[in-house]
Image (tube, rainbow, N blue to C red):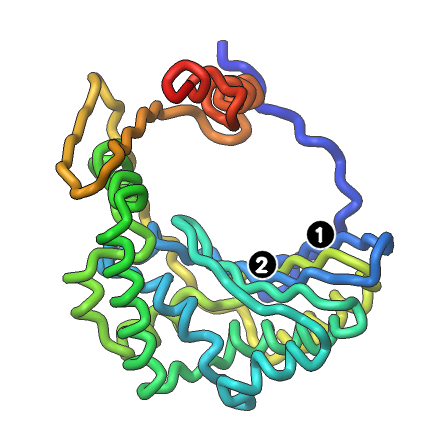
């Protein structure tokens, strides 16, 4: 008999779904006059479909701050800095997240900036060419990093069918075939209200924030959206190994096991086990192998 899933604790966050499918999560916290505003899109490296391994999600993360229909690229960062904020983004396997941390007095502006880039980015051609070179330098740095190369080898070994086997940044030879039109098509396909999530935490009025987001999205109805089919990973029936020679003074080694999803009742025990075995200088592996 299967164990019941974990029960997560209650939260004071307010969750809302707009008629167009956009999800909003707001948690008021007035302990300090700051806010974190985040825009999530369920488009990460595993969602690149026929372009799997190209790094579409990652290059799009770079491009969204390069300009919109109402803001030139430099205006985006300047306006955020003018209210004391800091803007950044990251791409993962299953999502791309754009975020601003700022004093809560700048909440409205920060929201407007993220709403703008998520819906009206123009991906200027000249900026696209520049950003391609930036990412190629990022590739080059990775090729010289034994830690990054060994981590990518781990995922390529652990997964045979699932797109987890591809690096988030993609493969350089596939990346080099991308055009701005490819990236723009990916943006228009995935960056739709019913594939987005806005998260706001801090000293804010949840009703006011929800009203601002809802009012903005009055002009952006739900769009047809076909979820990307993720190939199922077959069960691993035996040990897999991969060895690559790399010009470095230290050997990099990874040991990995497939484990259940985050809601599985064994997850807390697995987290504790991982901490005991390998986290920090008091861990068993550190003391036994290094010391």
Image coordinates of residue 112 in percent, x first then y, are 65, 77
- State the SS at label 2: strand
Is residue 261 shown above or below 115? above
Q: In front here: 48 or 252?
A: 252
Circle 1 residue: 15
Would residue 77 appear left or right of 146 to someone viewing this image?
A: right
CA distance for labels 2 and 1: 10 Å
Circle 2 residue: 197
Where is the C terminus found, in terms of image quarters?
top left
Image coordinates of residue 255 in percent, x first then y, are 31, 25
Is residue 167 shown above or below 273? below
Is residue 268 shown above or below 25? above
Q: Which corner quadrant of the image does residue 62 belong to?
A: bottom left
Closer to the chain start, of discs 2 and 1, is 1
Q: How many numbered badges does the structure rendering display?
A: 2
Q: Is residue 231 visible?
A: no
Verify CB contact (< 8 Å) between mark 2 and mark 1. no
Would residue 159 appear left or right of 90 to someone viewing this image?
A: left
Q: Residue at x 24, y 22 (%)?
A: 236
- Residue found farthest to the right: 30
Image coordinates of residue 78 in percent, x first then y, are 60, 83
Q: In front here: 50 or 101?
A: 101
Q: Residue at x 49, y 68 (%)?
A: 192
- State the SS at label 1: strand
Q: Which corner quadrant of the image does residue 39 belong to?
A: bottom right
Would residue 141 appear left or right of 104 to someone viewing this image?
A: left
Around disc 2, counting alpha carbons within 10 Å, would you say few (fewer than 14), some (14 to 19), or many (20 or more)? some
Q: Residue at x 27, y 66 (%)?
A: 137
Image coordinates of residue 44 in percent, x first then y, are 40, 55
């Amino acid at each position: 008999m299967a164990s019941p899933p974990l029960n997560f604790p209650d939260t004071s966050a307010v969750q809302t779904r707009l008629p167009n499918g956009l999800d909003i999560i707001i948690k008021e916290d007035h302990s300090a006059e700051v806010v974190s505003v985040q825009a999530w899109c369920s488009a990460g490296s595993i969602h690149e479909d026929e372009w799997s391994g190209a790094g579409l999600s990652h290059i799009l993360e770079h491009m969204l701050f390069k300009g919109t229909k109402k803001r030139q690229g430099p205006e985006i960062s300047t306006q955020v800095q003018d209210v004391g904020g800091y803007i950044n983004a990251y791409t993962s396997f299953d999502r791309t997240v754009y975020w601003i941390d700022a004093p809560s007095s700048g909440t409205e502006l920060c929201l407007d900036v993220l709403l703008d880039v998520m819906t009206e980015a123009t991906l200027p051609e000249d900026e696209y060419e520049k950003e391609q070179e930036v990412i190629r330098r990022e590739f080059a740095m990775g090729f010289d990093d034994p830690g990054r190369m060994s981590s990518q080898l781990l995922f390529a070994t652990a997964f045979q069918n699932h797109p987890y086997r591809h690096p988030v940044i993609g493969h350089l030879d596939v990346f080099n075939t991308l055009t701005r039109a490819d990236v723009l098509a990916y943006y228009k396909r995935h960056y739709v209200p019913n594939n987005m999530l806005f998260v706001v935490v801090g000293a804010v009025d949840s009703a006011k924030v929800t009203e601002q987001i809802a009012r903005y999205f009055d002009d952006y109805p739900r769009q047809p959206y076909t979820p990307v089919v993720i190939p199922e990973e077959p069960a691993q029936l035996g040990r897999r190994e991969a060895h690559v020679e790399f010009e470095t003074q230290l050997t990099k080694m990874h040991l990995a096991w497939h484990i259940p999803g985050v809601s599985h009742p064994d997850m807390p025990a697995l987290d504790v086990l991982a901490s005991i075995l390998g986290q920090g200088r008091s861990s068993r592996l550190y003391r036994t192998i290094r010391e």
